[in-house]
Amino acid sequence: MSPNTVATAAPWLGVPADHPFGIATLPYGVFTTTDLPDRRRIGVRIGDRVLDLRAAVEAAGAPAADLHPLVAGPTLAAMLAAAPSDWARLRAWITTQLGDDKARGLVEPFLLGCSEVTLLLPVEIGDYVDYYASAHHGSNVGKIFRPESPALPVNWKHLPIGYHGRSGTVVVTGTDFHRPSGQRKGPQDPAPVFGPSIRLDIEAELGYLVGGATRLGQRLSVDDAGSRLFGVVILNDWSARDIQAWEYVPLGPYLGKSFCTSISGWVTPLAALDAAHIELPRDGDDPEVLPYLRGTGTSPTGSGGTAYGLDVHVEVRVNGTVVARPEYRDMYWSPAQMLAHMTVNGASVRPGDLFGSGTISGPEKGQRGSLLELSWGGSEPFALDDGSSRTYLLDGDEVVMTAWAPGPGGSRVGLGEVAGRVLPTA
């Protein structure tokens, strides 16, 4: 859909024009219901209801038969493995059905209320990579941990820095997890100790699901990468900062981040964010990036054209208190550049691979996307609405992240939410 095209849901659906899950959004998810707990189904959200896609496509008969393979499975795997043209045809068909009053007889029997469904992990995650794409986050972390050194590493504006995470511990929103244990050693401690993390943190991010596969040795350009980005989720990269600090030199994060990564259950197609494209932030003295990180219309410093940013607004709540509102527009590297960099050495990708943007942080204190930054390494507690204060998370704390972006014609595109609660160490 063009950024200037305004579509509306059929009047009988009763979806307000300003609903974050209007016809401009149409995110996909996998769900079950109480009466059929073992039957996983693919749904698309419209307003506060969910359309069972397989049932609707089957009811449509021959005109929609070619769409059936995309929605028949128990996960989004077949959809992700399909071509971008297939993604576009499916989205166009759904938009037509939900925007046409005459299609009510086809659609209405297969609509369920959001409260009737339980969202599941939308696809088995193949590989998981997490990036470090916010200059503000990188600078804050550098100032906290390396006050005598430059805040950003010398390579930071030359390439997207990332690490490989553990795909098997990626969980869907609403999944509670136990506080991790591991080795930790403070600067003044004579020796490391083993025990539960006492500096449990969050990282507010966006995650990108990859569509299509590449062979070993095949590279994706920035232009190619854009067509391989299927959709976006909100991602919380839970982090045990004390475990991380002791282990990360010289090879980077390991047990401090591998215990749990939460993603939203609704996958927003990247096509829904066309109206949210913006230029990446660049300063006049930023270095030129190497040619493989430039796409069509991209400047020498790596911004513009197919290397675009996204105007996504994020909100982070701890036990119901809004503690931060990070702005994704501040991210230095684009998702297409991150995916191109991931494959430049010939590494292959598969449908369902996930990569995170890294913590979303801005220049203001209220835009910091981690508790490490909000509490400035634990030295500045922040207040919650119940009168308590935090530096890091306590057992029982619940973190909820939501996000939205501008849509066509002044509409709003919702990205759902990702929630999780800290349980005591098992």
Image (spheres, grey):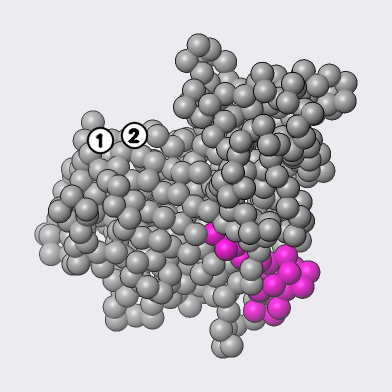
Mark 2 and 1 residues: CB-CB less than 8 Å, in contact?
yes
Q: Is residue 406 above or below residue 182?
A: below
Q: Is residue 336 above or below residue 66?
A: below
Q: Please give left or right for residue 243 compared with residue 344 in the image.
A: left
Question: How busy is the neighbourhood of tag 2: few (under 14 within 10 Å), some, or many (20 plus)?
Answer: some
Q: Secondary structure at mark 2?
A: loop
Assess whether residue 303 is covered by the magenta stretch.
Answer: yes
Please state the horizontal and vertical placement of residue 385, each as a whole percent of the image: 22, 53
Residue appearing at x 29%, y 64% in the figure: 374
Q: Where, by quadrant of the figure, is residue 110 drawn? A: top right
- Taking depth in this image into account, of 16 and 1 the one nearest to the observer is 16
Please state the horizontal and vertical placement of residue 407, each as a whole percent of the image: 64, 56
Q: Is residue 108 above or below residue 96?
A: above
Q: Main secondary structure of the magenta part?
A: loop
Please state the horizontal and vertical placement of residue 87, each as a whole percent of the image: 76, 40
Give the mark, 2 or 1, whose residue is nearer the N terminus. Answer: 2
Q: In the rendered image, which residue does mark 1 sit on?
A: 423
Q: Please give left or right for residue 305 compared with residue 37 in the image.
A: right
Three-letter residue code for mark 1: Leu
Q: Quadrant of the C terminus?
A: top left
- Taking depth in this image into account, of 302 and 331 the one nearest to the observer is 331
Q: Which residues are magenta?
A: 290-312
Please state the horizontal and vertical placement of residue 274, each as a whole percent of the image: 69, 57
Q: Is residue 135 visible?
A: yes
Three-letter residue code for mark 2: Asp
- Number of the label disc, if any, that sits on residue 249: none
Residue at the extreme bottom: 285
